[in-house]
Image (spheres, rainbow, N blue to C red):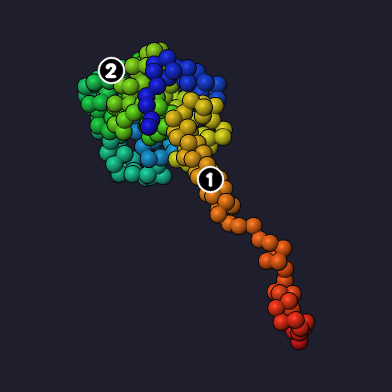
Amino acid sequence: MICMKSPAETRAIMKKLATQHPNADTELHYSNPYELLVATILSAQCTDERVNQVTPALFKRYPDARTLAKATTDELEPQIQSTGFFRMKSKALVGMANAVVERHEGEIPPRMEELTELPGVGRKTANVVLGHALGVPGLPVDRHVLRVSNRIGLADADDPEVVEQQLTAAIPARDWTKTSDTLILHGRRICKPKPLCDQCVVREDCDYYRSVLGVVAKAGRRNAQAGEALTKRTPRRTAAQEAPQGNVRQRQSGRPARAKK
């Protein structure tokens, strides 16, 4: 059974993970809050590497929310097509830019409530922008954070917002963004869907690892016990029983066994 770690245990585990992923940070390239917001919207169901290949030309053509707001989805779609779901993303980007211009005078707002009111911006995206570009503590929970935190026992929920609440309750606000970055990198590099437990620095603290080891150990003990029981049930063969069949026939008939032609 997987149980949540105490806040002290969670902080200790995060310190260990930080040694495995020093200087953890977002891998998206940006120079201001607007660029990070655009890049994060594009990163949905797409790798950061692919997004970083697309954004330089995009930012050159649309350097701020005002210029992006003037774009049409037909113009934008071919430029972001390689990131996937490009129709939905182009609609979200144009809608977001227009809302930023109309409601916030072209500046990305520094508050969660205002960010999540923008088209295409959910809580995870807002936390990314807040924590990395606006200096406001935020703990984004993506699929990697969800998987890793539940496996280790830092959290116990399938809902990203609940996991965010559980982690932020255990971690000081100043470390929220770093915690998310570290768990994301751990999920990408080590704690993958098929985890590389032998390379993990916190495997001894991990509920998932211990549960897997427990299953393996029990299976090993069952196999060993089955082998011992089989040995006890099987009588040892006598020398006569081990003798070749030809010699047995010779003793029974009194005649030498004929050689096969």
Front in this rendered view, residue 111 or 104: 111
What percent of the width, then of the height, locates residue 99? 23, 27
Identify the residue at horizontal 78%, vertical 82% (top origin): 256
* Location of residue 17 with respect to 257 vertically, above or below: above
Residue 218 visible in the displayed image:
yes
177 relative to 67 in the view: left or right: right
Residue labelled with disc 1: 225
Quadrant in the picture for the N terminus: top left
Kindly report the distance in space between the C-alpha atoms of the residues bearing marks 2 and 1: 62 Å
Q: Residue at x 71, y 82 (%)?
A: 253
Mark 2 lies on residue: 111
Look at discs 2 and 1 and give the one toward the viewer: 1
> Tag 1: Cα neighbours inside 10 Å, few (<14), some, or many (≥20)?
few
Q: Amino acid at mark 1?
A: Gln
134 relative position to 223: left or right: left
Q: Are marks 2 and 1 in contact (CB under 8 Å)?
A: no
